[in-house]
Image (cartoon, grey):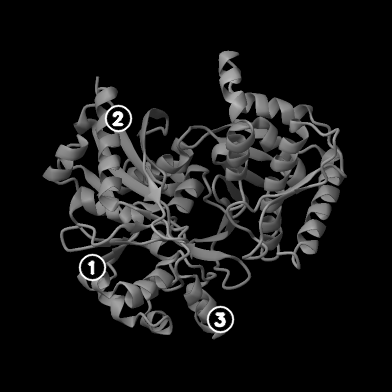
Amino acid sequence: MSQTYLLGIDNGGTVAKAALFGLDGREVAVASTRTEIVSPQPDQTELDADRLWQATAETVRRLIGEHAIAPRDIAAVACTGHGNGLYLVDDGGRPVRPGIFSADMRARAYVERWTAEGVDRAVRPLTMQALWPGQPNSLLAWLQDREPDALRRARWVLMCKDYIRFRLTGEAWGELTDMSGTSLLDVRSGGYSQEILEAFGIGGVREKLPPLRLPHEVCGRVTAEAAEATGLAEGTPVAGGMFDIDACALSSALTDEDTLGMTLGTWGINQYVSAAPVVDGVFMTSRYCVPGYYLILEGSATSASNLEWFVQQWLEADTAAVCAQSRPLYERINAMVAQSPRIETGPLFLPFLYGSNVSPSASACLVGLRAGHSRGDVLRAVFEGVVFAHRTHWDRLLRVRPTPTRIRASGGAARSDVWMQMIADTFQVPVQVPDGSELGALGAAICAAVAVGAHADYPSACQAMVRCSRRFEPNAQLESYYAAKYARYCRLVATHNDFW
């Protein structure tokens, strides 16, 4: 007996992922292919856009083939992916240069100049977000000066998931949630702004910005060429899709203002939905996929990737031994942290290996080590440091909103019960973890369901497709410990400003 499926595609930069879901949101099958980010010059991070499409197509084909899925049983497809960065293509969707990843820093000087000249303050009432080098406005200014021929040959300026959708359908569309995070739109009106483009000195690119659609609008159907590459059925509808922060929010059922979504991955994302925009005082306000709402976000690259680095650099020798014991490495790490005593004056870790939320020049450090400390104590410091970086963003959000009633957590660190309990104890609110291993793809699948009418709207789709089976209640007795430790963390940050 056939079953109806929804396909979510997620391109975060380093991995192309595809996942199939039933109409009830249950994960049926997952496949992934690693993609390569290269650095041709210092501060530059790029992807081969053709290879990105090939990896995505191969992933979808493998998913369908290995799990014996009838392509006609896939009712709809939607894509999500990293926001910002830049993908320039010609009329046929062929890349005119490598794609640029959102962590790219080549345009830093443009952001510094715009900040010094007050351009950021002038456009902030329209863009509602901070400026940073990996945004398309900065990259387009750089390309206009450094690679004018590539910009001239480009027909469309696309975001990552819009590029993948173009390769699936042959139709060029921008999508509102993604484009509203680029500093190219008037976020309140939801349209491109020539005033903003002129302020950044890139007024001539307006004709290269694709027409805008909503996430749940059908933005084309799988072409014969794409069907051959992916194994999908020709004519399968493809929804607009959404910014990856929206996909994570949607798969956490953020459909009201009481819940805060927290993603612990490469970036630490802390966000909530609001019927009213926040123009200033937060990192980013963008349009949310649920009509009538904005997504209010504080975030930085200060999250769980710090643990990945620590594992690769300091625990790699243990991996073979741990595998031989049939005990997963991260299970052992969780046990070491759980067994490490909570000591207010214990080691502190600043999780600034990949970025900072306090100073552009800040770097990571581990402070307070003594000979008697164990690896478990150091790992506890890493766990706590990541939580405290999220607390920094939490404090900024609480300047513009009341305390949320719950946190919905996602990302790699959400697999750790120890880490989730630490968050509940630090923030003193319950933490819930949605079921599933690919929540970005689930958010895209929810979008696909609404696009083809499988569910009437996002709230009803979330009610049917999202479930949380893990919940962590705060321990009131630990509130004072984490408050005092966080205060020490903040003092350590302050004392390092002169050093940085």
CA–CA distance between discs 3 and 1?
A: 30 Å
Q: Nearer the viewer, mark 3 or mark 1?
A: 1
Label 3 element class:
helix
Q: Can the viewer see residue 262?
A: yes
| Residue at x-position 55% and y-position 51% | 267
| Amino acid marked by disc 1 | Ala
Closer to the chain start, of discs 3 and 2, is 2
Please state the horizontal and vertical placement of residue 159, each as a whole percent of the image. Answer: 35, 59
Left or right position of 108 against 477? left
Local packing at callout 1 (Cα closer than 10 Å; few below 14, some 14-19, many 20+) is: many
| Amino acid marked by disc 2 | Leu
The residue singled out by tag 1 in the image is 154
Judging depth in this view, the residue of 257 and 163 nearest the camera is: 163
CA–CA distance between discs 1 and 2?
A: 33 Å
Asked which quadrant contains residue 491, the reply is bottom right
Label 2 element class:
helix
| Residue at x-position 63% and y-position 70% | 281
Rendered position, 81 above or below 281: above
Which numbered dot is residue 63?
2
| Amino acid marked by disc 3 | Arg
The residue singled out by tag 3 in the image is 121
